[in-house]
Image (cartoon, helix red, strand yellow):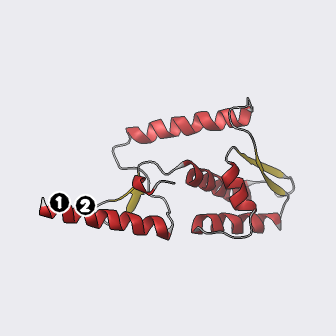
Amino acid sequence: MACDDIYIIDDGYLSAKEIGIHRAEILVIKEALSWIKQEGDLDRSYLICSDSKGVVQSLTGSKARDQTIWETMSALKELRDLTQINIKWVKAHDGIIGNILADALARKGAEEASKLAFSTPYIPICNKQMKKAIDKFIVEKWQTRWD
């Protein structure tokens, strides 16, 4: 995920114009796990598909370098104690109906978000991204004062 997309708003919160595909996919899977835990039928099995091989590898690996990935891995482990749940990579743009629908909904969501009067929604970011965003903000403020 490119850190150039992150910026600081005057009230001190971090936001993002575009959060990046990897981060978005992780957040969507985390939300799906949350839905399964709260609303799902734990007597059935679940299969979550993602067209991001990197996301699937991140969630099936043994180490999480990012807080959001760690939280998602923890939610997955907790749910696997309650029900059968798997995450699978699927090839993008290969005619898989669920993936086509997910892409269409993502496009629609991006279009609707761009129409909002507010800035983009706040999202969690890793420490490395936060440090880079703060450094960029400080340099921009410094440069503005000296121009």
In the image, residue 122 lies at what x, y percent? 44, 57
Q: Residue at x 72, y 54 (%)?
A: 56
Kindly check if marks 1 and 2 are in contact, taking CB atoms under 8 A apart as contact. Answer: yes
Location of residue 60 in the rendering, given as x and y in whole percent from the top left corner: 75, 61
In the shown orientation, is residue 146 left or right of residue 38?
Answer: left
Q: Secondary structure at mark 1?
A: helix
Along the line of sight, which residue is nearer the eye, 40 or 124? 124
Mark 2 residue type: Glu
Asked which secondary structure carries label 2, the reply is helix
Left or right of 66 in this view: 116: left
6 relative to 117, above or below? below
Real-space CA distance between mark 1 and mark 2, rounded to the nearest whole angstrom: 6 Å
| Residue beneath the point at 33% across and 62% down | 136
Q: Point out residue 21 in the picture as x, y percentages from the top left corner.
A: 56, 48
At label 1, counting other C-alpha atoms closer than 10 Å, the crowd grade (few under 14, some 14-19, many 20 or more) is: few
Tell me where residue 97 sits by quadrant. Answer: top right
Tag 1 residue: 144
Q: Is residue 68 visible?
A: yes
Residue at 40%, 65% (x, y): give it: 132
The circle drawn on residue 37 is: none
Closer to the camera, 50 or 113? 50
Q: Identify the residue under disc 2.
A: 140
Does residue 34 appear to the left or right of 127 in the view shown?
Answer: right
Expressed as whole percent of the image width and height from the top left, the position of residue 74 reads 70, 69
Q: Residue at x 48, y 70 (%)?
A: 127
